[in-house]
Image: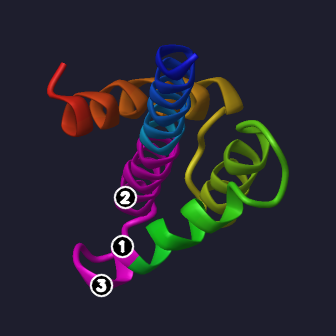
Amino acid sequence: MKSFDDRQKAFEAEFKRDQELVFRIVARRNRLLGLWAAERMGLPAGEPAEAYAKTVVSADFEAPGDDDVVRKVTGDLAAGGVAATEAEVRAELARVGEEARRQLTGR
């Protein structure tokens, strides 16, 4: 029985690590999307762009899924006079998602 308990604990630990990694990747992805949108809106690099990126990361906590982030960025771009479709924002979200995964996992 001890080996079964050890194996179960190992699976639980692996699951926890995987979930934490997914959370970190999504947060990094949203930050990168925020920096992309900040650049498109003409916000200065540095603190103003980082501050905006944090609002994009925070927007992800409103509802499950990516719709809240896409809606925020699309709306902010439109309010800033930048033409961007939802499809364009989703494509950038996918691109920066891969970049975030590479940054955090090295693959």
Q: CA distance from mark 2 to mark 1?
A: 6 Å
Whether the residues at callouts 1 and 3 have beta carbons within 8 Å, the answer is yes
Mark 1 crowdedness (10 Å alpha carbons): few <14, some 14-19, many ≥20: many
Where's residue 18, x and y in %?
A: 46, 31
Q: For the magenta stretch, what is the residue range?
A: 23-50
**Seen in the image, is 81 located left or right of residue 70?**
left
> In the rendered structure, which amino acid carries the disc numbered 1?
Ala
**Seen in the image, is 73 located left or right of residue 26?**
right
Mark 3 crowdedness (10 Å alpha carbons): few <14, some 14-19, many ≥20: few
**Nearest to the observer: residue 71 or residue 28:** 28
Where's residue 55, x and y in %?
A: 58, 71
Label 3 SS: helix
> Residue at left 35%, top 24%?
98
Q: Residue 49 — which label? A: 1
Is the residue 98 above or below the residue 43 in the image?
Answer: above
Considering the image in quadrants, where does the N terminus appear? top right
Q: CA distance from mark 1 to mark 3?
A: 6 Å
Label 1 SS: helix
Residue marked by disc 2: 35
